[in-house]
Amino acid sequence: MNNWRENDSKSVWHPFTAVNMDTVNVPIVRGEGAWLLDADGKRYLDAISSWWVNLHGHCNPYIAKRVAEQVMKLEHVMFAGFTHEPAVELATRLLEKMPEQFTKVFYSDNGSTAVEVALKMSFQYWFNQGTPKRKVIALEDAYHGDTFGAMAVGGRGVFSKPFDPFLFEVEFIPTPVSGKESECLDRLSQLIEKEEVASFIYEPLVQGTAGMQVYSSAVLDKMISMCRDKGIVIIADEVMTGFGRTGSLFAMDQCEEKPDLIALSKGITGGFLPMGVTVCTEQMHQSFWSEGEEGKMKTFLHGHSYTANPLACAAGCASLDLMEKPETWESIRRIEQQHTKFALEAAELSGVAAVRHKGVILAIEYGTGSQTGYFNSLRDRLYDFFMERGIILRPLGNIIYIIPPYCITEDELNLVYSAIREFRI
């Protein structure tokens, strides 16, 4: 289409975009490494990995080759009653990287569905035992996706307000950031003593959309231990934190206590194709098994048309190949070190109220008085400032964050830091 740029505003409804604004969406035609190129030839440094999905760089040739090879073999087959090698390989390799109690991978399409699957599994776990429990505990300001179950366990606010009457009841406890650990643990203790709790869901170590709020593995271990003592199903939403983002392959690797269910997505295919997976323990899997007709009634009746798509599975296997290379972890460590050094400087910059850092994630919060939240007036200024300089940083209100692809060079990352130094409230 020669006029595809003009037809965008006529034909396409973009996510998280107000329809009363004359928004011009940047027409991207090509990607390479950490860069995106628009139709007018301008280059943009993708410092947030296109919503955190891109691990190894745009159009990574190794992953592209693996996907192209798979296209010529098998593009798709329904996954109920059928299987294929890429799905088995990816599931097997994921499980090999996890503690031995994790034995099954359930495929879906994205982060929201990976969370939906985990929630449904947790509810049916109790249903199958004849002791249905309905209460869920989650962290304040959490974000787990935009489908109904995922919204229900997310912090209530502007994202969920039109749908609040339709969401199931959830008990929210304070996120155990520094200074709130005791308050969080006390509230959790109260809830698990008096409520029939089905599950506890959390974003391990870093809450993404909440502004990259960081908390310790020690307090998370304590929370998980308290829930496990009560038999509560524990769900880790590693959609954002998985695949090296917190400095280890999975954030749970930094904890002694492990969950029962893990939701994965975003970086799982290296940013090439949509995919979500929910990983479960053998105990969880066995709760869906029984002899004869009773076993049929315990079936987990959930699926998607593109479950375990072979192309996405091939991309996932290729991305794991790259994650297993020493060079990838050398890049992760370098990014961590650069962030650590710049974080000290950023804390002293004019207008900066807080700096948070974990693994390859760096967040900078600007002080704007009492006004906070997603629609903070500083948001558009921040976005436009960096876009004018060819840097993609999509602010969370008055907070900017950097989660770069691992291929980003030292000089490219310094370009981002330099632009941050220039910004003034």
Image (spheres, helix red, strand yellow):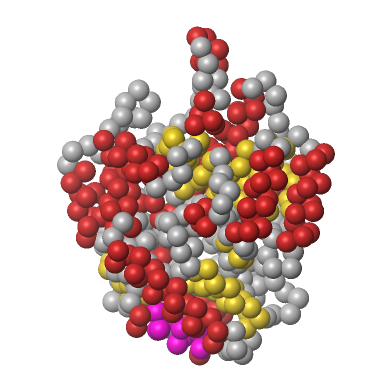
Residue 343 or residue 353, whichever sits in front: 343
Residue 242 or residue 270, whichever sits in front: 242
- Give residue 240's position: percent from left, percent from top: 49, 57
Residue 44 or residue 65, whichever sits in front: 65
Residue 78: image quadrant is top left
Residue 87: image quadrant is top left
Answer whether residue 348 is magenta in the image. Answer: no
Residue 85 showing in the rendered view? yes
- Give residue 286's position: percent from left, percent from top: 52, 25
Read off the magenta span.
Answer: 413-421
- Give residue 307's position: percent from left, percent from top: 39, 36
- Give residue 234's position: percent from left, percent from top: 61, 42
Quadrant of the drawing holding the N terminus:
bottom left
Residue 209 showing in the rendered view? no
Point 64% across, 22% down: residue: 129
Residue 80: image quadrant is top left
Mark count: 0
Residue 158 or residue 46, whichever sits in front: 46
| Figure check: 112 above or below 392 | above
Residue 414 lies left or right of residue 22; in this view the side is left
Point 22% across, 57% down: residue: 62
Point 67% across, 35% down: residue: 231
Residue 164 lies left or right of residue 35; in this view the side is right
| Figure check: 423 above or below 283 | below
| Figure check: 410 above or below 158 | below
Quick one: which residue is furthest to the top in this view? Answer: 292
Q: Main secondary structure of the magenta part?
A: helix
